[in-house]
Image (cartoon, rainbow, N blue to C red):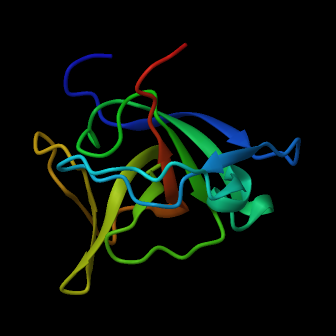
Amino acid sequence: MAEGEISRVISIECVAAGRRVPLPVILSDVPAGFPSPADDYIEKNIDLNEWMIDNEIATYIVRVSGNSMNDEIHSGDRLIVDRSLEPRNRDVVIAILNGEMTVKRFVIRERRIFLVAENSHYSELEITGESELIIWGVVKHCIHTFRNG
């Protein structure tokens, strides 16, 4: 990926009903600041499908390429996108702008609509009467891998 490449969707996968895998979860918070003693037990099991997907038939997983959203979303991340949601101010969305699919923050300011990158090297895009904008879906979750294998 070239330096300064805009964040784009490079693949879309439909969420298919399949095997449910309950995972153990510790219900106490883990502080990101100073360490504290952790609970010595697992409270219950959760299924990530139940936790991350509200509307199965409208949910897709998209893979991102580019760095325009690097403060939150990195190239190679996978996003859980719900197409049934209406975007709210400051939501991260999958947008089709003038025929190009992209990942941006949806911002409403003074009754004007903008698509805003999280990387300061990119200008915000104001949506004008000449722009063709389709909000394809609202990003609910980002899956960011820290380590493979």
Image position of 140 with respect to 1: above or below: below
Q: Nearer the viewer, residue 85 or 4?
A: 85
Image position of 128 with respect to 104: above or below: below
Q: Position of residue 136 (x, y in %)?
A: 56, 59
Q: Nearer the viewer, residue 73 or 52?
A: 52
Question: In terms of image quadrants, where is residue 62?
Answer: top right
Q: Position of residue 59 (x, y in %)?
A: 69, 56
The residue drawn where x is 47% and y is 47% is: 142
Which quarter of the figure is the N terminus placed in?
top left
The residue drawn where x is 45% and y is 60% is: 28
Left or right of 143, for residue 72: left
* Residue furthest left as drawn: 120
Left or right of 129, for residue 24: right
Q: Nearer the viewer, residue 146 or 109?
A: 146
Image position of 110 with respect to 26: above or below: below
The residue drawn where x is 44% and y is 20% is: 147
Image position of 16 with respect to 50: above or below: above
Which quarter of the figure is the C terminus placed in?
top right
Left or right of 25, for residue 100: left
Q: Position of residue 55 (x, y in %)?
A: 73, 66
Q: Nearer the viewer, residue 84 or 29?
A: 29
Question: In terms of image quadrants, where is residue 68?
Answer: top left
The residue drawn where x is 28% and y is 53% is: 31
Left or right of 55, for residue 122: left
